Amino acid sequence: MDMIVANKQFTAQLRILFCIVLFEYIFFIFSGVGFSFLHGDRFFNLGVDPASWVIYGLNIPQYLTTHHWLGIILDSSAIIFLLLFIRNPFNRWFALLLLILLFLFYMTLSGYHTHRNFQVGFVIVFFPFIFKKNINKYFAYEACRYFILIFYVSAALLKLSGNALSNTDHFSHMLSSQFTPYFLESNTGFRTDLNLYLIHHPGIAYALYFASFIIELSAVIGFFTKRYDVLLAILLLGFHFMSWLIMDIAALGHLGFISLLFLSRQVSTRFDGNG
């Protein structure tokens, strides 16, 4: 009986996780960056990732962006597949379809814009669920978990190596340069007032910047134990919320991915190598 209850709880948690991913994708569409909005014959900005060279070499994104009707179909398909997968989060074929479809979306979006976006978490989150055997699911989950940890620890180390923490005015100067267009356009509101306050109070700005460094660096704990994964997930989600509030940087692509940390113990129990 306890095992049945635990299985139901785990299934419910997976459904919540992928509801977050569904929210992310719907938000992409309403933000104007879904498949159906990436249309037109334009120059594509390819990165250093060889995977993008293959996809663009096969002319897939070029074809998608010049056929608007196909973009609408792919956006609709992504939502339908996500709804079906939420209904049955153990269907590995839906997971595989979503992994391929959203990876193609990520590659098309990255090449379409002139800036690089490394928020690929909404794609990688499906990786552990494409495998049939539990032991493979477990190792794939562990790979995703360590990727999350390395992602944030490396960000903290970059702050250290770049001597960003040695200058107490660094963050206030960063805000001043980033929000120059806002000030020139006379944008008003809570975020503008908050940024002006932090620009004129570099000590408080530095304290917030140092706190972000501590949160990123705290992910190193996960290399040694899973005991604090839930706390790490809360801290990282809080970090991104504050980044959005202060800097207008919305890391929507990582919300579901970070939420994998909430499932560490459940995954260890369910996918412990049996099956």
Image (cartoon, rainbow, N blue to C red):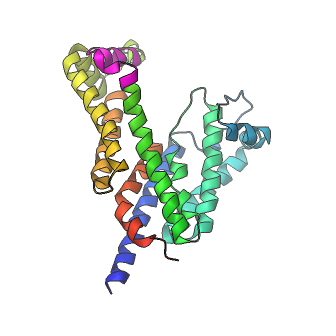
**Residue 275 magenta-drawn?**
no
Q: Position of residue 68 (x, y in %)?
A: 71, 44
Query: Quick one: 83 or 218, which is closer to the camera?
Result: 218
Left or right of 4: which side holds 78? right
Left or right of 12: which side holds 93? right
- Bounds of the magenta segment: 160-178
Question: From the viewer's perspective, is residue 186 above or below residue 215?
Answer: above
Q: Position of residue 82 (x, y in %)?
A: 54, 61
How many numbered badges does the structure rendering display?
Answer: 0
What is the quadrant of residue 57 in the picture? top right
**Which residue is rendered at x = 30% and y = 21% of the image?**
165
**Which residue is rendered at x = 46% and y = 56% of the image?**
142
**For the stretch drawn in magenta, what is the main secondary structure?**
helix
**Which residue is rendered at x = 52% and y = 44% of the image?**
28
Question: From the viewer's perspective, is residue 5 above or below residue 123?
Answer: below
Q: Position of residue 6 (x, y in %)?
A: 35, 76
Q: Position of residue 90 (x, y in %)?
A: 52, 71
Query: Quick one: 250 or 213, which is closer to the camera?
Result: 213
* Residue 22 visible in rendering: no
Residue furthest to the right in view is 58
Residue furthest to the bottom in view is 1
Q: Quadrant of the N terminus?
A: bottom left
